[in-house]
Every structure is written in structure tokens, then in C-alpha cells.
Image (tube, helix red, strand yellow):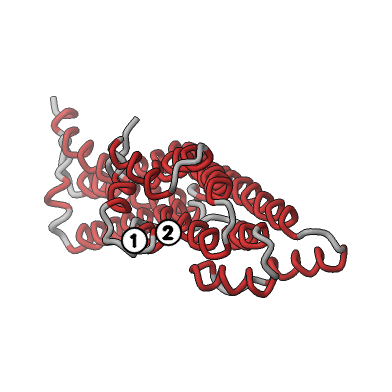
């Protein structure tokens, strides 16, 4: 399969292919050229960059997912860590993060679709009243009818915005969990000091050392063990926790969407659908289907 876009889903595949080529002993520049010849858009951008342009700077401009790979590339290139193994680990991490997003999207599909469908029910009720022959239009021209119409429209809008916010809140947070821990592990795997590793990661865009990263490094120092595997285990646990949290938020969304449905959509249905029919009957209008 060839890749000609900056689709973030393609980044793990491209990184994996690049790692395989590098492990085969092919130089980085030639590896990028081979991928470009295969139709990969990002590889083409790297291969076409002017001489002296850093690969990481090109990758950083290809979107959020590639900017995360750019951090791994910059760190490995700066400290002399193996590029192939670094890219392979990041490709696996990105694929895991994408699977988490896919799981959440699948779990959110049904409740989100249900919320959108139910949100149109008040307008369906208005159309039903017209089909049944109630003089809904004249009702909506009267002061009481206008008030009902405005109140129903406001409730419909509120329900849609409320539902949209609930769905958005259930989406997984942006970014790759454990990115910094993985980047520091890459730097330490080259044999540099902890201070040097943290400095290189910060310069590459990985940010200043977080409290969690420093805690892992302190634990490794007290135990007298290499921090690389501890950092990688921490990053893997952060990704596992992100996946679990995403699934839990998606599972809770179905019940939370009942709030805007019950508090906004149902009253809007009554105001726009039932109330105009009753007002039409009280005004003496006889539905067409009910006339002899």
C-alpha cells in the first residue's frame, strides 16, 4: 500500500518500514528516497528537502503524529542512539494509540448517532402535526405560539450543544501517552548521562522533565538499575491507562446523553409537537384527517 498524504494513520506504517530499511543497513537518506519512490508523501518531503535540512524539522511540519516521531528522530540522531530500534518502538506506540482512538470511536458511534437522531424529533413532531391537518402554522403566528416556538428552538439548540460537548469530552486526549518517557529512554540507551538525556529531549521538543519522569529516574538511581526499561514500562502503562480510560468514558456516554434528551429534547418535543396541536384544537381548528 502506498501513502501519498499526511494521514496520521499512515505514520506508524511509514516509521515501521523505515526501521526495517535501517536495520538492513541502508543509510537514512537512501531509506527515505526508497520510501519516496514507493509513493510516500512524507518520505518525498524529506528526500526533497534542501541539503543540510534536518530530518526532524521536516517531520515536525507534517502534522501532530509526525512531530512526535520527529522528537524520537532528533533525540536518537543527537545522542547516537540506534535509529531503527527507536523508530520501531515509536511506531508500535503510535499504532497502539491509534487503536485506542479507533476503539473509542467505535464505542461512541451508537450513542452519538442516537443523540443526533433524537435531536430532530421535535421537528418531526411539527411535520407530523402538519400532515395530520392541525393548523400549526397559524398557532405559531400567535403570541403564545411564538413563545412556544422560541422556547422549543432554544431547548433543541441547547440539547445539541450539550450532546456535542459530552461526545467531545469522551474523546481521548490529543498526544502520545508516555512520549517523554520513551524519548528519555532513547537518549539513555546511547549511554549519555541523565542530565544530558533530559536536555536533549527538551531541545527536541519533548518538554521539560515531568514529575513522573523524574520519579522513575529517581527510583532507578536508588535501585542502582538502568532507567531505560523502567521508562519504557512507564510509557507502556500510560498508554494502557489511556486506553482503559477511553473505553470507560465511551461506556458512560450512553447514560450521560440521557440528560440532554430528558431535560431538553423531550420538553422541546412537547413544546413544538404536542402543544401546537392542543392549541389548534382549543382554537376550534379541526384536523383534516378527522373531518368527515
Q: Nearer the viewer, residue 18 or 91?
A: 18
- Residue 43 is left or right of residue 167, and the answer is left
Determine whether 150 is above or below 265 in the image. below
Residue 118 position in % (x across, y down)? 37, 42
Residue 290, given in percent of the width and then of the height, sits at 19, 29
| Residue closer to the observer: 231 or 142 | 231
> Can residue 115 be seen in this snapshot?
no
Horizontally, residue 66 falls left or right of residue 24, namely: left
Determine which of the numbered discs, if any, sits on residue 85 in the image: none
Report the residue at 53% width, 40% height from top. Answer: 23
Q: Is residue 3 above or below residue 235?
A: above
Q: Is residue 14 left or right of residue 245?
A: left
Q: Is residue 5 visible?
A: yes
Q: Look at the numbered discs 1 and 2 and tell me whether their residues touch, using CB distance below 8 Å.
A: yes
Q: Position of residue 145 (x, y in %)?
A: 21, 57
Residue most toward the right?
223
Residue, x 53% and y 55% (percent of image)? 176
The tally of labels here is 2
User: On the rendered image, what quadrant is the N terminus found in?
Assistant: top left
Q: Secondary structure at mark 2?
A: helix
- Provide the secondary structure element on which disc 1 rests: loop
The local crowd at label 1, few if under 14, some if 14 to 19, many if 20 or more residues have their Cα within 10 Å, is some
Give residue 229's position: percent from left, percent from top.
73, 53
Residue drawn at (33%, 64%), measured in percent from left and top? 53
For residue 61, which numbered disc appears in the image?
Answer: 1
Nearest the eye: 288 or 73 = 73
> Could you tell which of marks 1 and 2 lies nearer the N-terminus?
1
As drawn, 93 above or below 73? above
Q: Label 2, on which residue?
A: 67
Position of the C terminus by quadrant: top left
Residue located 23% across and 43% down the image: 126
CA gap between label 1 and label 2 equals: 7 Å
Amino acid at each position: 500500500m502506498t501513502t501519498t498524504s499526511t494521514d496520521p494513520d499512515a505514520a506508524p506504517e511509514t516509521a515501521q518500514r523505515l526501521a526495517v530499511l535501517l536495520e538492513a543497513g541502508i543509510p537514512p537518506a537512501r531509506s527515505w528516497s526508497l520510501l519516496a519512490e514507493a509513493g510516500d508523501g512524507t518520505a518525498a518531503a524529506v528526500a526533497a528537502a534542501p541539503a543540510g535540512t534536518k530530518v526532524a524539522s521536516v517531520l515536525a511540519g507534517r502534522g501532530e503524529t509526525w512531530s512526535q516521531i520527529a522528537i524520537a528522530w532528533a533525540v536518537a540522531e543527537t545522542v547516537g542512539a540506534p535509529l531503527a530500534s527507536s523508530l520501531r518502538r515509536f511506531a508500535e506506540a503510535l499504532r497502539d494509540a491509534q487503536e485506542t482512538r479507533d476503539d473509542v470511536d467505535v464505542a461512541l458511534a451508537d450513542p452519538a448517532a442516537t443523540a443526533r437522531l433524537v435531536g430532530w424529533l421535535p421537528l418531526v413532531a411539527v411535520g407530523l402535526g402538519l400532515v395530520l391537518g392541525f393548523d400549526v402554522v397559524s398557532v405559531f403566528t400567535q403570541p403564545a405560539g411564538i413563545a412556544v416556538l422560541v422556547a422549543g428552538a432554544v431547548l433543541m439548540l441547547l440539547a445539541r450543544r450539550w450532546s456535542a460537548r459530552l461526545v467531545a469530552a469522551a474523546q481521548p486526549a490529543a498526544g502520545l501517552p508516555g512520549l517523554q518517557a520513551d524519548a528519555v529512554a532513547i537518549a539513555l540507551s546511547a549511554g549519555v548521562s541523565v542530565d544530558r538525556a533530559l536536555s536533549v529531549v527538551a531541545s527536541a521538543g519533548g518538554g521539560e522533565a515531568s514529575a513522573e519522569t523524574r520519579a522513575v529516574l529517581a527510583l532507578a538511581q536508588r535501585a542502582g538499575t538502568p532507567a531505560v526499561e523502567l521508562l519504557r514500562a512507564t510509557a507502556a502503562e500510560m498508554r494502557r491507562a489511556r486506553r482503559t480510560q477511553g473505553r470507560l468514558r465511551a461506556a458512560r456516554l450512553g447514560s450521560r446523553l440521557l440528560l440532554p434528551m430528558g431535560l431538553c429534547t423531550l420538553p422541546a418535543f412537547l413544546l413544538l409537537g404536542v402543544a401546537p396541536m392542543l392549541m389548534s384544537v382549543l382554537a376550534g381548528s379541526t384536523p383534516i384527517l378527522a373531518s368527515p
